């Protein structure tokens, strides 16, 4: 094994840099626009840097308040709604998902295949197939344009995946520990809550990460089900900005950055869990 | 402890069903029931233009109307164009980048984190990013290409029918390829190193060992990628809706865009439901065909 510099090493390094640049430049450009003074966004020729950092756009969104029609305020409320919806979805999905996964792996309920079927089904279904009837029902029941309808929908869309992840993990836990707890007079539920779940931290976290990110990023359901600030999510507010004929690019770029902070934190700090979630599902299929 | 073990198993079972109940109820309410409802809708004429007439059962008429409309077939062809590009470019690209990264290096964790950036972003954020890049006057792409000297005049990337689809495909690949890279990296890691060493001793070239060792080992991952990419691209909606709205001149109206418009702009729920079922059928067929293809090759 040689450890010397080889020309082929240089080529590899160059190729890796190209890959990284392709990924980072679009992100850099968005960040740059969000921090540019308004005049510089619409000036030619194109500049790579910023002559003067301008955080006005960030201030405008963060300190916005209710006005008749205000893009910045709509987006700020959208961020809040998305946060509430995603947190609620994550907690409920992971809770019911763990219960279900435990039932399938340890309590002899022959439901594993049905759940596998649901994992595939929720992947393959054109979402519109569910959106149309849920819209009609939501309209009848009067829960259109509420966070509740979105939370319930997202729970259903993510439950199969969550059960799948938890089931894979429960299978690797030795059942001997649980059995000794059962002998000690701890019921099944006691064993689940006091022994199994506390031991399942990494899996609970992985499942939660995926569910949260899916809910945070979802667009179609939110687009159809929500109409105003009560329930409109961050993605819908953003799409409105993108679609507008005359858009304030600085504000739009800023909203993109603000809406991406959480997902980017997930990658930066919890990369391992993301990768295990992606490949875990793949290896088992 | 005076209960018989048999009744303990029965107890376990009862508890198990109770624990699964919430999941079952939610899945029935939000997935199973709506699927049935959608199917029922697809057999109804809702008479949107004349609500006084109410709805009437029309059997397969909605399906026939969809199959007879040129719009359906055109949008299907456009979708297939997207799928083909994603499979033929996205998968080899993912494999190539994974091969490039499959080496112990300093900063490997950081590189992987950067590669994952696009994967975790919302598709709407993806649109937003590329809207800023493709802007005809102040966008990054025109600026870059003129500075390098490739372009003389600025190109309106998203308003030319011949270009818009390609631009969407690029944006879609930017977001979709990291998933393939991560899968391929995991696959490459699982190949035993001894096989490469043995091949090298036998004098096999790098290309040969790639062809005869790497590719056969990666077959399940390639299959997985093809299935996932096909499914996801047939559902492609967010970036089309927000970047081009299906235009210019309908050149990017993919199937899910068409279904959305029929259902929520023209309120033709029956037609929309029929189209959704046709789409589901098509995707299912493709997945079955893929799995047959891959199984046969193995024998």
Image (spheres, coloured by chain):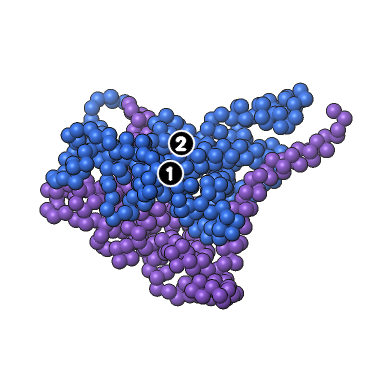
Chain colours: A blue, B purple
Residue A113 in the image: above or below residue A18:
below
**Residue B82: numbered disc:** none
Q: Residue furthest right?
A: B2
Q: Are discs 1 and 2 both within one chain? A: yes
Q: Image point 83% across, 38% down: which residue?
A: B7
**Image height check: is B79 above or below A86?**
below
Q: Which residue is mark 2?
A: A274
10 Å crowding of disc 2: few (<14), some (14-19), many (20+): many
Residue A172 sits in quarter: top right
Residue B218 screen position, x and y as percent: 44, 44
Q: Is residue B178 left or right of residue A176?
A: left
Total residue callouts? 2
The residue beneath circle 1 is A78
In this rendered view, identify the residue nearer to me: B92 or A224: A224
Q: Chain of mark 1?
A: A
Rounded to the nearest angstrom, the CA distance separating label 1 from label 2 is: 26 Å
Above or below, A198 relative to A84? above
């Amino acid at each position: 094994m040689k450890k010397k510099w080889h020309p082929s090493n240089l080529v590899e390094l160059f190729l890796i840099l190209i890959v990284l640049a392709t990924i980072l430049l679009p992100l850099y450009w968005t960040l740059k626009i969000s921090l540019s003074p308004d005049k510089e966004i619409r000036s030619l020729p194109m500049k790579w840097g910023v002559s003067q950092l301008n955080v006005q756009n960030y201030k405008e969104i963060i300190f916005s308040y209710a006005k008749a029609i205000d893009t910045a305020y709509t987006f700020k409320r959208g961020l809040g709604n998305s946060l509430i919806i995603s947190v609620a979805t994550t907690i409920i999905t992971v809770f019911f998902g763990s219960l279900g996964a435990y039932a399938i792996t340890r309590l002899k309920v022959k439901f594993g295949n049905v759940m596998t079927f649901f994992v595939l089904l929720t992947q393959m279904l054109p979402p519109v197939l569910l959106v149309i009837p849920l819209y009609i029902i939501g309209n009848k029941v009067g829960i259109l344009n509420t966070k509740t309808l979105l939370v319930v929908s997202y729970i259903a869309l993510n439950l199969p995946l969550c059960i799948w992840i938890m089931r894979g993990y429960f299978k690797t836990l030795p059942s001997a520990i649980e059995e000794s707890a059962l002998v000690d007079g701890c019921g099944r539920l006691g064993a689940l809550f006091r022994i199994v779940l506390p031991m399942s931290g990494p899996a609970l976290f992985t499942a939660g990460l995926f569910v949260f990110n899916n809910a945070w990023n979802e667009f179609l359901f939110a687009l159809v089900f929500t109409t105003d600030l009560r329930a409109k999510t961050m993605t819908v507010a953003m799409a409105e900005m993108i679609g507008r004929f005359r858009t304030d690019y600085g504000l739009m770029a800023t909203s993109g950055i603000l809406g991406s902070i959480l997902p980017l934190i997930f990658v930066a700090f919890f990369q391992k869990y993301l990768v295990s979630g992606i490949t875990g599902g793949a290896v088992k299929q | 402890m005076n209960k018989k073990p048999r009744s303990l198993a029965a107890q376990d079972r009862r508890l198990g069903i109770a624990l699964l109940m919430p999941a079952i109820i939610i899945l029935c309410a939000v997935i199973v029931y709506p699927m049935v409802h959608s199917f029922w809708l697809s057999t109804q004429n809702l008479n949107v233009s004349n609500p006084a007439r109410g709805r009437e059962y029309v059997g397969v008429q909605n399906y026939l109307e969809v199959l007879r409309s040129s719009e359906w077939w055109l949008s299907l062809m456009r979708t297939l164009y997207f799928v083909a590009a994603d499979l033929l470019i996205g998968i080899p690209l993912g494999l190539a980048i994974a091969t490039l990264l499959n080496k112990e290096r300093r900063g490997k964790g950081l590189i992987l984190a950067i590669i994952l950036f696009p994967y975790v972003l919302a598709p709407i954020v993806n649109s937003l990013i590329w809207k800023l890049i493709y802007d005809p006057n102040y966008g990054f792409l025109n600026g870059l290409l003129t500075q390098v000297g490739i372009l003389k005049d600025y190109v309106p990337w998203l308003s030319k029918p011949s270009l818009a689809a390609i631009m969407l495909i690029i944006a879609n690949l930017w977001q979709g390829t990291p998933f393939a890279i991560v899968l391929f990296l995991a696959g490459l890691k699982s190949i035993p190193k001894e096989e490469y060493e043995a091949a090298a001793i036998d004098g096999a070239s790098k290309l040969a060992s790639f062809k005869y060792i790497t590719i056969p080992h990666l077959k399940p991952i390639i299959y997985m990628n093809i299935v996932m990419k096909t499914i996801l691209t047939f559902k492609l909606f967010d970036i089309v809706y927000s970047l081009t709205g299906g235009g210019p001149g309908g050149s990017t109206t993919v199937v899910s865009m068409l279904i959305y418009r029929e259902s929520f702009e023209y309120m033709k729920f029956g037609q929309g439901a029929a189209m959704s079922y046709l789409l589901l059928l098509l995707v299912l067929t493709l997945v079955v065909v893929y799995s047959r293809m891959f199984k046969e090759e193995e024998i």
